[in-house]
Image (cartoon, rainbow, N blue to C red):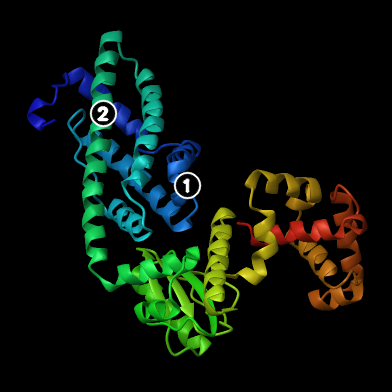
Amino acid sequence: MHNAAWPPVSARVAELFRRGAEAALEPPADWLEGLHAASLSGDRMRPVADDPVLVAAVRRSNVANLRQWTAANVRQPGVRVPAHLGPEVLDTARDLVRRGLDQRALDSYRTGQAVAWRRWMQICFGLGAGAQELQELLDVSSLSISTFIEDTIAAVSERMEAERAELTRGAHAERRAVVTLLLEGAPIGRARAEAQLGYRLTGPHTAAIVWDAAADRLEAAAESLMRASGAGHRLTIVAGSAALWLWLPVEAVPDVADPSVRIAIGRPGADVDGFRRSHLDAVLTQRMLTRLTSPRRLARYSDVQLVALLTAEPAQTDEFLADTLGALRHADAETRETVAVYVGEQCSTSRTAQRLFTHRNTVLRRLARADRLLPRPLAENVLGVAAALEVLRWRG
């Protein structure tokens, strides 16, 4: 539909439209979370929902699209809103293509549209409009929302095609294709893979994922990891506008303090199997950090393996924490830390006091307080309490 065919809007309905758009500018946080959850639901969105970087990109796009439509209707209520091609949307398109996904991943726009439409109707019904005015408002706003979403999808699809064409012309596409085959366990000759990657698959490998930062910071962090590990080279795959996949030909990677990025490190491995497994470890670590909204900037699979298993299902995690810790879950940090250290020191109060630089009687008082808060005495459930406290340690 061209602008010339856009239906006219009466002055009264335009004013109602403007008031509704103003009310929608700052949506409630719980509703916004519902929008994000809906846009990432469904089998076709599973590859996106399983990737923390893509999840963050979709969330940014949702907010940007919502602000574009509402702000445009505050300025010019009822006028056709142009497709949104801001940096959030374009970065999402680029990330989807670099993950090998196609336009089906744009289903999130239409799913989000249904959620937004329900909220918009609630707003409209609260504006005090007459029956005829309300009908006109709903008619034009339905057309406005659906047209905006379809125009944006069409524009993003076009940009994805351009990005895909660009990638297929470069060495990046070739490296990414080879890495995908290796990670999937597909039959590919070692010599051919090494020639295309420029990276030896024999010997040790440690994989890492660096994400949640601008491209220059990602590259700087990757270079720091390589130098700190003593490696002379690395394999780097651009996994999106805010993520890099790395492989280093080393058996150990030291911690690199860089608060501007997030880093997940897999276990070291050897040869093709180690190449694959170390990356999958890093992916699981990245997903766990995101799932728990953990404030940690760097994590290793070896440190989070147990927590990752315990937190695979968020609802069951909450139930486990409540059943195991009871009121200790919300106790002061000193009490929780004392219990964790006490378990780690094999239930020795003397060694716990030394580790915490405090008096043994203080440790005993804190342990007694913990026993009063726990559903079962600590001595009856040492392993369960230790595991639950470890989950809390990583959780944001």
Q: Residues within 10 Å of mark 2 (few under 14, many from 20)?
A: many
Task: Place residue 381 in its image quadrant.
Answer: bottom right
Q: Which residue is mark 2?
A: 18
Along the polypeptide, which appears first: circle 2 or circle 1? Answer: 2
Residue 168 percent location from the top left of the image: 25, 64
Is residue 240 shown above or below 158?
Answer: below
In percent of width and height, residue 88 lies at: 32, 53
In the depicted structure, whether residue 240 falls above or below residue 39: below
Q: Which residue is mark 1?
A: 46
Q: Amino acid at mark 2?
A: Arg
- Residue beneath the point at 84% across and 67% down: 343
What kind of element bears circle 1? helix
Q: Quadrant of residue 243?
A: bottom left
The amino acid pointed to by label 1 is Arg
Question: Does 174 appear above or below 204?
Answer: above
> Is residue 238 visible from the viewing direction of this image?
no
Q: Residues within 10 Å of mark 1 (few under 14, many from 20)?
A: few
Mark pair 2, 1: CA separation: 37 Å
Name the front one of labels 2 and 1: 1
> Residue 364, located in which quarter of the rendered image?
bottom right
The picture places residue 2, in percent across and down from the top left corner, at 10, 32
Q: Residue at x 76, y 59 (%)?
A: 387
What is the quadrant of the C terminus in the image?
bottom right
Front in this rendered view, residue 78 or 177 = 177
Q: Quadrant of the N terminus?
A: top left
**Position of 46 compared to 304: left or right?**
left
- Identify the residue at image location x=13%, y=26%: 6
Where is residue 372 drawn, in percent x and y? Answer: 89, 51
281 horizontally vs 146: left or right? right
Residue 323 appearing in the image = yes
Q: On the picture, is 346 further left or further right than 206?
A: right
